[in-house]
Structure formats: C-alpha cells, structure tokens
Amino acid sequence: MAASRLPSFVRQHLAALRVLLVLTVLTGIAYPLAITGIAQLPGLHDKANGSLVTNAAGQVVGSAELGQLFTDKDGNPIPKYFQPRPSAAGAGYDPTSTSASNLGPESLVDTFDDPATTDVDESKQSLLTQVCARSKAVGDLDGVDGRRPYCTANGVGAVLSVFRTAGTAGTITRVVSINEECPATPFVATYQGVKVECATLGADYAAGILVPVRGPGKGTGNPVPPDAVTASGSGLDPDISPAYAYLQVNRVAKARGLDPAAVRRLVAEHVDGRALGFMGEPTVNVLDLNLTLDKAAR
C-alpha cells in the first residue's frame, strides 16, 4: 500500500533498477560462467585457453593460432628456422595491433623520407615495392631467383611517370623513375627515346602518367609463392603454404646440418589439408614445424 503512494518517477526508477539487477546477474554473471564452463569441456579446453604451445622444457613459446617472428635481435631471419609470411600487424605479428596494410593493386608509388626530419621516418613503400622487396629478400635468403615482373633489380617497383605535351596524348617530354630517388641510376636509361630521370624528393609528378614497366623478373613459375610476399588480413596468420615451406627446406637443412630429404619429409608430415576436405588451401603451421625441428635436434 505504501509503495502505491510513491511518486510515479520513483516507481519507474525502482522498476528500472530491478531490471538492471536481473540483467546484470543473467548477462554479467550467469552467462559468462556458463560459457566459461562449456569452454573447459574436453575438446574445447585448449582452444578456449589460447591454443598455447610448449617446447620440450614445458615452457610456453607461442600459440598455434597466432604467427610469430623467427628473427634475431637485428630483425634478420634466423636461417635454421622456417620463416612465416609477412605481417602488417605493428612491427610484425603484434596481437595488440592486428591489421592489414589496406594497400591495393593501384598502390604503385613510394614516399621518400625527408632527411631534414631526423626524428621521424616518413618513407612509405607502395604495395608493389613491398612485394618486390620481399620477393628479392626471400630469393636471396633461400638461394632462388626472386625477381618478379614490374620490379627493378634492387627490389622496388619498376614504375615510370611519363609526361606528354597533351596530358595522356602527344609527344613524351619527360620520364621519371618514380620509385628511385636521386642520385640513384634509373633501372632503364631511356623510354621511347626519352632519357629517364631519377626522382627528386618533394617534386610534384602528379601530371605524369604512371607506367609500370615489365622487367626481366619471372611471371608464372616464379619460385617465391604469393604468401611469401603478401601479408594476411589479420597480420597474425600462423600458417604458410606448402610451397613456401618446401622453398625453405635447403636453407634450414644446411643451417642445421641435416639431410634436405629428411627435412622435406618433415614438412610433408606437417601439411594440414583443406578444412572439411574442400575449403581453403593446404597449410603448414610454422611454429609447430620449427618446434619439431628443435625437438629432433635434442
């Protein structure tokens, strides 16, 4: 009876408070506890706890679901380990900064660093140059021809900015190798009879027409597979293609003093097939493969 004499706004607030308390118990306590309990059931426990991986000494060394770098203190690949694909997550495989580069096929022009601003690096590689540089680096590391089409011998995008007398038509008046900063020597001396210049920091080349030039690099049949030169959407992909794993066999075998055939068989044993037999592509988990090599060496 007393409650009925409370002002309406008080009754409304009390009702809202009761709803808040009920929903807090249901969604803030009961539901999380139920999901946590279900996640600890056999078969779900490992995945729910992060799919953590331990070494022979029982130390946690990573997660089967997150990629990681296998580099030395200077950022160089450690030869005895299989290397993952590139990562755009922070400085590489940073789970707190998962991301993609968001660069597309039209990303052809690099940005040069201004030496006057010593406190910050303003340089930015185009997607084309990133692919060129990564392919060259993989080729140098694993002893194969990493040259790709539309790449210079130095591993940057082979792109010219071509100026004409009438915009997109007319006589060519000037040609600039847009990704090669002066005093670099352009990857081609002339283009359609016009001398090719190196690019100058701060110059405006927007009026030129971008022309990718197909160089001597291989197209089809290039030994460096796509996943070795492109980052995944999350930047945390723990897997590589079997093709990239097999490419690294000779280098890993030499660094560990093993028979390449034995390392190749080990890679074959670590190839995971398509999900449900038809989705996606076969993969190799890099951390699992490297840990197996370390255990075999003990």
Image: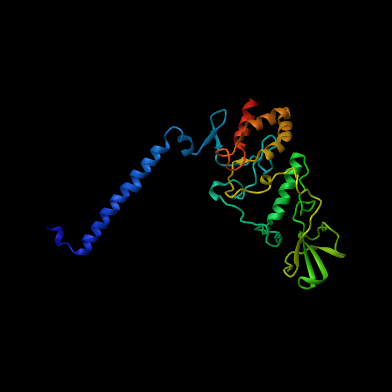
Q: Nearer the viewer, residue 192 or 126?
A: 192
User: Quarter holding the N terminus?
Assistant: bottom left
Residue 154: image x %, image y %? 78, 51
Image side of residue 26 versus residue 271, left or right: left
Q: Quadrant of residue 54?
A: top right
Farthest-out residue, front: 278
Residue 193: image x %, image y %? 88, 65
Residue 95: image x %, image y %? 54, 46
User: Quarter holding the C terminus?
Assistant: top right
Total numbered labels placed on residues in the image: 0
Farthest-out residue, bottom: 166
Image side of residue 106 versus residue 49, left or right: right
Residue positioned 42% across, 38% down in the render: 39
Residue 101: image x %, image y %? 62, 54
Farthest-out residue, left: 1
Residue positioned 15% across, 58% down in the render: 3
**Position of 72 relative to 203 (above/below):** above
How has the structure been colored for display?
rainbow
**Position of 181 relative to 298 (above/below):** below
Q: Nearer the viewer, residue 188 or 62?
A: 188
Q: Quadrant of residue 284?
A: top right
Farthest-out residue, top: 298
**Position of 6 relative to 134 (above/below):** below
Q: Nearer the viewer, residue 60 or 170?
A: 170
